[in-house]
């Protein structure tokens, strides 16, 4: 292997000494004074010069001085070398020079790692561009299907992002993205305004349908459900559940209404036949009266006994025939009357069944608890029973603690699932005679008939404990759900809103006392 050429100043003993030491290391020659002297002479252009102790010592002394100045990290080895030179210990000098030569031997140059880092950075950037492009194509475009212009713009941006290979191209794509976000935000605002306007129009329509009908009992349940869905936040799960329940009720009501139409048609036909029979009876009576008048006239105009006998026989025959026709008409009229009564009863039964079908939609579509209409009916029924038999009647208002934080942290779907979980646990713990209704949002009302105040408080406290034991799971993660409650005992004749207001005030007292508590409302004074 050719020895690399290094240009040095041969008139400078320090540079010559450094080069001599370098060549000793490169040629793997023992760094003895003789070898050092030989290479030194070779460098300065005096090859084969005899070893000269004084010149070797001078050269080594210059090397020591140069190493001390330019290589402070080798100070220990240089100090040992200088001491060996002073003692003329050339063996020690040789050993120290070998160690210094090893330290000064050039290390192989490693390829810089900058290229790998840059390559990794480029790969990461390419992956990010691809992810952004796919997000635009599969995430954003699918949400803009109702706006072809924004769809086309998002697709063009996806292509631009994927092909952006320079900083300028990326800046251009970023500008396009900002423009797209602004357009989407404006569109979302317009869509929200349109939705709210449609909700208001539909709500006005629903509220006025009942006023257009003389009897809305068969439709009231559906109207209440639609109003409840419109009043709250529009969620796909609530809409699907409401649609399912409305379809079931509409189908069942269709069957009942078909029977109602048939019963009405039967009643109309019966009434028509009845009137016809009455007319026939009247006509037959008129005909009989005419025949009687004719026989009377014949009797007054004859003196013949035989003719009088014939007239009498004819009169008796006409009377018997009239009696037979009258009896037959009477029986037919009774049959028609009974048929009419049966048809009328059937109509009333079908109307009652139709109203009951409407009552099937009086449940909250999300939690399957009673909605406001169902609550009103159950409260009125239990209040009437309590007043009639002078039995205690309690209610409890429940409000889930920190529900807004739960919604904000985990999403509205988790909040809905938490409401469903509460109702499920409540039904497991409540008695068959108890009812739970949703007042709105995260607030519920529990109806506790034939229950004194202290027992009602125990029931609600037991429900609280069960709720803390039976964890609510969100993506297999246990989430603690608690509620604050206010319990009130209704007095005889107390209106529903007044009793609920007292329980609601006690619930707020439980909130202020630290939540997850049950507070009792003061006993109301009899009016």
Image (spheres, rainbow, N blue to C red):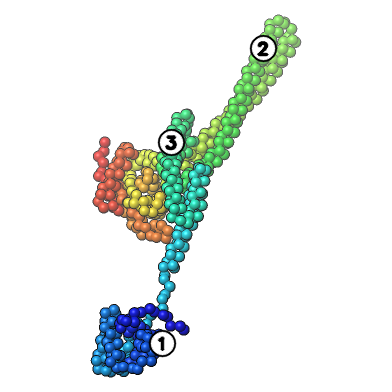
Residue at 36% over, 59% down: 469
Looking at marks 3 and 2 on the same chain, the residue that comes earlier in the sequence is marked by: 3
* Mark 3 → mark 1, Cα distance in angstroms: 94 Å
For label 2, the SS is helix
> Badge 3: few (under 14), some or many (20 or more) residues near its Cα, within 10 Å?
few
List the residue tagged with mark 3.
197
**Relative to 302, residue 202 above or below:** below
Q: Point out which mark residue 27 bears.
A: 1
Q: Earlier in the sequence, mark 3 or mark 1?
A: 1
Distance in Å between CA atoms under marks 1 and 2: 163 Å
Q: Which is in the foreground here, disc 3 or disc 2?
A: 3
Residue 290 tag number = 2
Q: Are marks 3 and 1 in contact (CB under 8 Å)?
A: no
| Relative image position of residue 322 (x, y in whole percent) | 66, 19
Per the model, the C-alpha gap separating discs 3 and 2 is: 76 Å
Q: Quadrant of residue 286?
A: top right
> For the residue labelled by badge 3, is the local secondary structure a helix, a strand or a loop?
helix
Asked whether residue 364 appears in the rendered view, the answer is no
Which quadrant holds the C terminus? top left
């Amino acid at each position: 292997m050719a020895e690399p050429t290094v240009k040095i100043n041969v008139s400078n003993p320090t540079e010559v000494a450094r080069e001599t030491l370098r060549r000793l290391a490169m040629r793997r020659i023992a760094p003895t004074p003789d070898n050092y002297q030989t290479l030194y002479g070779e460098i300065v252009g005096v090859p084969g010069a005899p070893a000269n102790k004084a010149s070797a010592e001078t050269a080594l002394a210059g090397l020591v001085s140069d190493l001390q100045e330019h290589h402070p990290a080798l100070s220990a080895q240089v100090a040992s070398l200088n001491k060996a030179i002073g003692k003329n210990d050339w063996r020690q000098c040789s050993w120290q020079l070998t160690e210094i030569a090893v330290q000064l031997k050039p290390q192989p140059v490693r390829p810089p790692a900058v290229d790998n880092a840059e390559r990794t950075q480029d790969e990461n950037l390419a992956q990010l561009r691809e992810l952004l492009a796919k997000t635009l194509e599969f995430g954003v475009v699918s949400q803009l299907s109702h706006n072809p212009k924004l769809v086309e713009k998002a697709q063009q941006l996806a292509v631009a992002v994927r092909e952006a290979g320079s900083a300028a191209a990326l800046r251009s794509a970023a500008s396009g993205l900002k423009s797209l976000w602004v357009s989407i935000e404006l569109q979302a605002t317009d869509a929200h305004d349109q939705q709210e306007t449609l909700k208001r129009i539909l709500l006005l329509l629903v509220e006025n349908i009942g006023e257009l009908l003389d009897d809305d009992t068969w439709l009231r349940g559906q109207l209440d459900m639609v109003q409840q869905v419109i009043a709250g936040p529009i969620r796909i799960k609530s809409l699907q559940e409401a649609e399912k329940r409305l379809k079931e009720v509409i189908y069942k009501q269709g069957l009942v209404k078909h029977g109602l139409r048939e019963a009405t048609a039967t009643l109309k036909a019966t009434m028509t036949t009845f009137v016809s029979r009455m007319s026939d009876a009247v006509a037959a009576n008129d005909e009989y009266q005419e025949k009687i008048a004719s026989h009377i006239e014949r009797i007054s105009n004859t003196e013949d006994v035989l003719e009088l006998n014939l007239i009498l026989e004819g009169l008796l025959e006409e009377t018997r025939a009239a009696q037979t026709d009258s009896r037959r008409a009477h029986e037919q009229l009774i049959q028609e009357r009974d048929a009419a009564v049966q048809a009328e009863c059937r109509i009333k039964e079908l109307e009652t069944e139709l109203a009951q079908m409407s009552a099937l939609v009086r449940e909250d579509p999300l939690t399957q608890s009673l909605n406001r209409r169902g609550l009103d009916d159950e409260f009125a029924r239990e209040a009437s029973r309590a007043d009639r038999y002078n039995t205690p009647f309690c209610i409890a208002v429940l409000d889930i603690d920190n529900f807004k934080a739960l919604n904000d942290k985990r999403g509205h779907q988790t909040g809905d699932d938490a409401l469903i979980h509460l109702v499920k646990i409540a039904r497991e713990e409540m008695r068959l005679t108890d009812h739970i209704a949703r007042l709105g949002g995260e607030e519920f009302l529990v109806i506790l008939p034939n229950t004194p105040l202290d027992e009602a408080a125990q029931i609600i406290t037991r429900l609280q404990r069960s709720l803390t034991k039976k964890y609510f799971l969100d993506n297999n993660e246990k989430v603690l759900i608690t509620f604050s409650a206010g319990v009130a005992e209704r007095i005889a004749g107390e209106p529903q809103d007044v009793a609920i207001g007292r329980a609601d005030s006690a619930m707020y007292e439980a909130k202020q006392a630290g939540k997850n508590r049950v507070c009792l409302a003061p006993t109301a004074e009899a009016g």
